Amino acid sequence: MKRRPMLVVVGLILAAFAMGLWMGSRFSGRTVRSGIFPRPLQPAIASVTPARASVTSAVSNPPPCVDFRNAGPLVGKKGCVTGVVLRAYTARSGNTFLDFCQDYRTCPFTSLIFAADKEKFGDMGSMQGKRVEIRGDVVSYQGHTEIVIHDPQQVRGGQ
């Protein structure tokens, strides 16, 4: 009688471990923003003026947009990528992908809206066939360049 509850506990622990491994392999290489480990604070006196100046210059001089085929050199930086959205596809997971090529598997660039952020956006299907500019952190995921869209202000055009 005592063995059965112990087997259930061990089974649950193994299932949780396997789920953690699966999630880790699924999202490895992606930039995930989290409030758990915030950036360390800079000294207030040293950062007030330069930080405001850099924010002002970044807003007044945004980086120029590059064609989605040329986005590779932007990996690891903030950037702007432009192209015509051929398809807006929502997977069973709820994540929405903006595809810029006929075959997404061979396309050098993709853009993604996670299901958790989808409620912030309207009908992404209306973007099909329209030229858009996508701004954000350019990352590499499974050999492809991508921008994860968290906010509608990251996307311009498509109207």
Image (cartoon, rainbow, N blue to C red):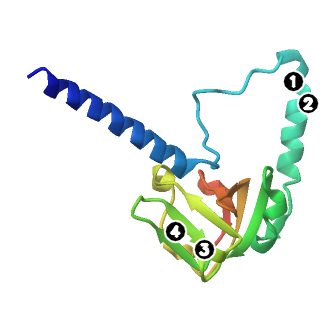
Q: In x, y percent, where is residue 1? A: 8, 22
| Callout 2: SS | helix
Q: Is residue 155 left or right of residue 3?
A: right
Query: Which residue appears at 15% of the width and 24% of the height?
Result: 3
Q: Which comes sooner in the sequence, label 3 or label 2? A: 2
Which residue, given by chain and number where applicable, does mark 4 sit on?
A: 124
Q: Can residue 24 be seen from the camera position used here?
A: yes
The circle on residue 50 is 2
Q: SS of the residue at dot 4?
A: helix
Which numbered disc, 3 or 4, marks the residue that appears first in the sequence?
3
Q: Position of residue 130 (x, y in %)?
A: 64, 79
Q: CA distance from mark 1 to mark 4?
A: 39 Å
Q: Which mark is residue 105?
A: 3
Q: Nearer the viewer, residue 101 or 128?
A: 101
Q: Amino acid at mark 2?
A: Pro
User: Residues under labels 4 and 2: Cα distance?
Assistant: 38 Å
Q: Which residue is mark 1?
A: 47
Marks 4,2: beta carbons within 8 A? no
